[in-house]
Amino acid sequence: MKAGILEDGVRLFPESGSPQGGVISPLLSNLYLHEVLDEWMVNVVPNYLKGRWFIVRFADDYVLGFQRRDDAEKVLAVLPKRFSRFGLTLHPDKTRLVAFGRPNGLQRPGTFDFLGFTHYWGRSRKGHWVVKRKTAKDRLNRSLKQLSGWCRLHRHLPIREQHATLQRKMRGHYAYYGITGNARSLQQYRMQVARIWCKWLNRRDRGYRLTWERFSVLLRDHIPLPRVRIVHSIYGAKP
């Protein structure tokens, strides 16, 4: 709670909030939101609703689902007041009402991001409407930006050492985002990693040019990147 944060080499001690990514943040979120949101939604809110509803929460990220639009609007209207009673505020960009019903040809449903995935409606292999998930655009861009920064700083390491580290980073990415239906986003990530690596290898020596064609041969025969892997199957998940 009193550890402070390090920003541009300066140690600061803010009087409110917690450090971004700090280990105390999810703990505080669970302590606060269990009472502020979970208990309130279970014990109080249902008395004023007409249809079915659900809540999914992970730390300070959550999704509220309602069968009826009027129920959703009613809760959305009182939610800021509920939070303010405990000195909390809602994120203005993430708090919104989304029509997410099954497509019927009259209205195109919206999408929403939750835990790094964009949730949207799509067709299954058998042609049925199902909820699908893909890597959220901002998360994909952030992952690639961080990887590019690593390649830039370590471009003079032996290629085998770079390859070993990139393999670990990519397997970590697959371990989280490797979910049913997300293969296309994973393939995009894998291709972009290869292009980023080739770019920074080309900046090791001004007198040497590594063409994409030659680099592709190296990837295929000597330093292959991990293939896309679906780690989590939503069809095997238990309710």
Image (cartoon, rainbow, N blue to C red):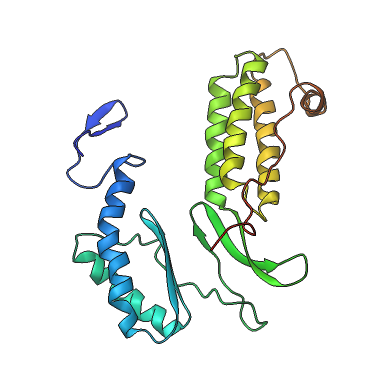
The residue at 73%/66% (across/down) is: 124
Q: Nearer the viewer, residue 211 or 96?
A: 96
Q: Position of residue 134 (x, y in %)?
A: 61, 55
Quarter occupied by residue 163 = top right
Figure quadrant of residue 79: bottom left
Total marks shown come to 0
Q: Is residue 216 above or below residue 84?
A: above
**What residue do we see at 51% from left, 51% from top?**
116
Image location of residue 84, percent across then percent down: 21, 65
Quadrant containing the N terminus in the rendered view:
top left
Residue 235 position (above or below residue 82): above
Question: Quick one: which residue is furthest to the bottom in this view?
Answer: 50
Snapshot quadrant of residue 48: bottom left
Q: Indicate the position of residue 14 as horizontal and vertical percent values.
A: 20, 40
Residue 79 left/right relative to 85? right
Where residue 66 sits in the image (x, y, percent)? 45, 77
Residue at 65% over, 34% down? 193
In the rendered view, tell whether residue 166 sits above or below residue 121.
Answer: above
Q: In this rendering, is residue 204 above or below 39? A: above
Which residue occupies the foreground of this view, 83 or 192? 83
Q: Is 55 left or right of 111, judged from the image as shown?
A: left
In screen coordinates, is 185 left or right of 153? right
